[in-house]
Image: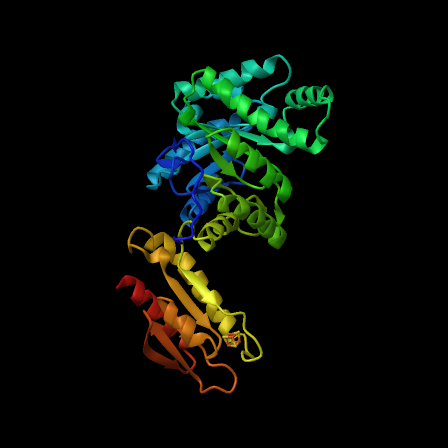
Amino acid sequence: MSSNNPQRRASVGVKVGPVQVGGGAPIVVQSMTNTDTADVEASVKQVLELYRTGSELVRLTVDRDESARAIPEIRERLAKLGFDVPLVGDFHFNGHTLLTKYPECAEALAKYRINPGNVGKGSKRDAQFAQMIEFACRYDKPVRIGVNWGSLDQAVLTRLMDQNRELAQPRELVEVQQDAVITSAIESAEQAVELGLPKDHIILSCKMSGVQELISVYERLATRCDYALHLGLTEAGMGSKGIVASTAALSVLLQQGIGDTIRISLTPEPGGARTQEVIVAQQILQTMGLRSFTPMVISCPGCGRTTSDYFQRLAQEIQGYLQNKMPEWRGKYKGVEDMHVAVMGCVVNGPGESKNANLGISLPGTGESPVAPVYEDGEKTVTLKGDNIAAEFQAIVERYVES
Ligand code: SF4
């Protein structure tokens, strides 16, 4: 953790199964499956992949009878494998019906996500929202009141637009729209409290798909309440665009101390791993010095002094090796996630960065003698040479962690 860490916004802590969100707890990483929840085998496999990568909460779609019936089975299968994964049910449109029909689903979930814009229309809206909150009260479960700009409660928007028209100096339309997103979240939370759900059972989110809009909405939301906040740029997109947009938005907010749990909504590349969103979330928190998850690999960009791709491959292999080892090492080797490993391309910056890291290797650049000095805790301990440098360095990393 960096000593420059921003002061966190004070929020009411919420227990989601064994995980605390807000109230000064470390910022929680969460993710969502993209399997058909009714496919128990595929869902258990993906929940486990996400959880083992470091997702502390995992959300699943609960959209129909089959998926509601699958939830208790998924939970049981995970428990039999020895994993207590807090599962979050994502409800839209028919959540009140599904919770009523399947109390065992209501019981098995650790949290319900309720979208106030999709709970019901007209006069039914309040009754159906109340029905879901009643289940949260009955089973002592927290809820996330999750507003999305794309499915905003139109009744709230219409009301605020009408009020705005009556003002002597009407506000900009975009400001009223953003206000409607915030108001929908806060009014729904107040309604839940009136229905008997304690404040420490409520998390709020107001997701937008534009970076500037998201920042603006959360900055205002953060000053209007002390509920724990879930951050995420919705529909962030694919590949580097999704990663950059999410990082840009979230880092501005996290730097202001706003946010108690984060989810990175990436569109996976076809055939790509769902776990990427967990790794990106962890990397945002770790590079900002807010939490540590996996030893960090520091590597230089390479230049004309690194004419082969040997050094890039070694950096990538070590990063992958550390990432894969973490489920086994986490909890077994105290502080391993704070480790820094430097993989440098030549002697220009190699020895300096290697000495600053827990472990470092400076590979031979063009024109240098074909040797790679290795540093452990600032001291040069060995010089590797030959064709086996990568495997030997990996063995040194393993020995270092285990000792
Ligand atoms: Fe280039 Fe060496 Fe600097 Fe890496 S450390 S960028 S190889 S000069």
Q: Quadrant of the C terminus?
A: bottom left
Left or right: where 239 falls relative to 202: right
Q: Is residue 153 depicted above or below 217 in this figure?
A: above
Say if residue 13 shows up in the picture. yes
Q: Residue at x 63, y 52 (%)?
A: 241
Q: In the rendered image, which quarter is residue 358 located in? A: bottom left
Looking at the picture, how far across and down is residue 123, in whole percent? 62, 12
Looking at the picture, how far across and down is residue 272, in whole percent? 56, 52
Q: Is residue 93 depicted above or below 318 in this figure?
A: above
Q: In the rendered image, which quarter is residue 84 located in? A: top left
Q: Is residue 127 depicted above or below 221 in this figure?
A: above
Q: Is residue 124 depicted above or below 227 in this figure?
A: above
Looking at the picture, how far across and down is residue 219, in whole percent? 55, 37
Q: Count numbered badges in the picture.
A: 0
Q: How is the image coloured?
A: rainbow
Looking at the picture, how far across and down is residue 191, in whole percent? 51, 18
Q: Residue at x 41, y 22 (%)?
A: 198
Q: Residue at x 56, y 79 (%)?
A: 307
Say if residue 209 shows up in the picture. no
In this view of the protein, which residue sits in the foreground, 103 or 323? 323
In this view of the protein, which residue sits in the foreground, 71 or 398? 398
User: Which residue is most to the front?
Assistant: 168
In this view of the protein, which residue sits in the foreground, 264 or 162? 162
